[in-house]
Amino acid sequence: MDGDVAVVTGGTRGIGRATAEKLAASGAAVVATYHSDEAAAAETLASLESIADPDRVGTRQFDVGDHDAVEAAVAEIVDEYGRPTVLVNNAGIMSNGLLVRMSPEQWERVVRTNLTGTFNCTREATRHMLRGDGGRIVNVASVAAQRGWAGQANYAASKAGVVGFTRSIASELGGKSIRVNAVAPGYTETDMYETELADAEREAVEAETASGVPASPEEVADAIAFLASERSSYVNGEVLRVDDGLIG
């Protein structure tokens, strides 16, 4: 991926950090974005600088749900690194709760980050890709988009929106040298996995997978890196499940 410029949102923890590290190791210039965790950003930057030329890696802080902030940040990235050729929309949050107890704020915050954030970043990155030689966009969805779990109406709806968004813009941009795909992970060993699910829920979910264990962030990042590279040159509008047979 020498010559590529990759932006990975939510790129300083979990799947995002593993993806940023893999893309940097493949030769791409990489910018990992984050919302607020300065400690994780510093750790990720140190890791990226140990993998690649420090001048070709970096971090940026902004809220993906804030269109003006996204527009400004992408412009800064273009000025420093060049037009993005790869965008990984990984930034996402959970705020679980049963429907009748879910507050409007819980709903809006999850949809704003997971779905509106994907729109904001894709819109701005695509504008620059169209002025260049095209690019690849990988959206991180979830198996929850296909099989919703109780207490995750906001999360499942947001990720189902990401799937529909992916397929629509893949059709729209495919003739303009921009491929758009999604990865739908099952349960993965991330901070979100540890904090949002009770032990009983984790045991029940893991019992339904072939291996009985959650994925590592690196295993999901391998799928993302494939779709972000030219090795997947004839793959467009696809949703690749990485779930160890969780939903069959």
Image (cartoon, grey):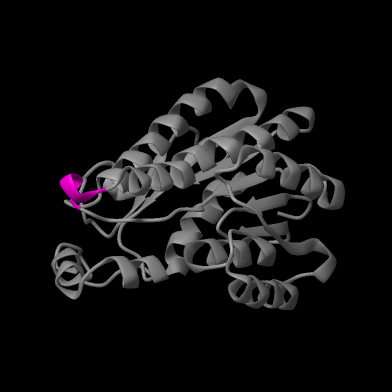
The answer to which quarter of the image holds residue 208 is bottom left
Q: Is residue 190 visible?
A: no
The region drawn magenta spans: 98-102
Q: Residue at x 48, y 47 (%)?
A: 113
Q: Is residue 77 visible?
A: yes
User: Quick check: 105 above or below 122?
Assistant: below
Left or right of 6, for residue 180: left
Quadrant in which the N terminus is drawn: bottom right
Main SS of the magenta part reads helix
The answer to which quarter of the image holds residue 24 is bottom right
- Near-viewer residue (157 or 56): 157
Count of residue discs: 0
Find residue 111 and report its horizontal and vertical position in percent.
Answer: 41, 42
Find residue 210 and report its horizontal and vertical position in percent.
Answer: 20, 65
Q: Residue at x 45, y 31 (%)?
A: 165
- Near-viewer residue (162 or 215): 162
User: Quick check: 134 above or below 212?
Assistant: above
In the image, residue 112 lies in the stretch drawn in magenta: no
The answer to which quarter of the image holds residue 215 is bottom left
Q: Residue at x 25, y 67 (%)?
A: 197
Left or right of 78, for residue 229: left
Q: Residue at x 73, y 28 (%)?
A: 130
User: Quick check: 126 above or below 73?
Assistant: above
Find residue 103 and report its horizontal and vertical position in percent.
Answer: 29, 47
- Near-viewer residue (244 or 5): 5
Left or right of 141, for residue 197: left
Find residue 150 and report its horizontal and vertical position in percent.
Answer: 16, 51
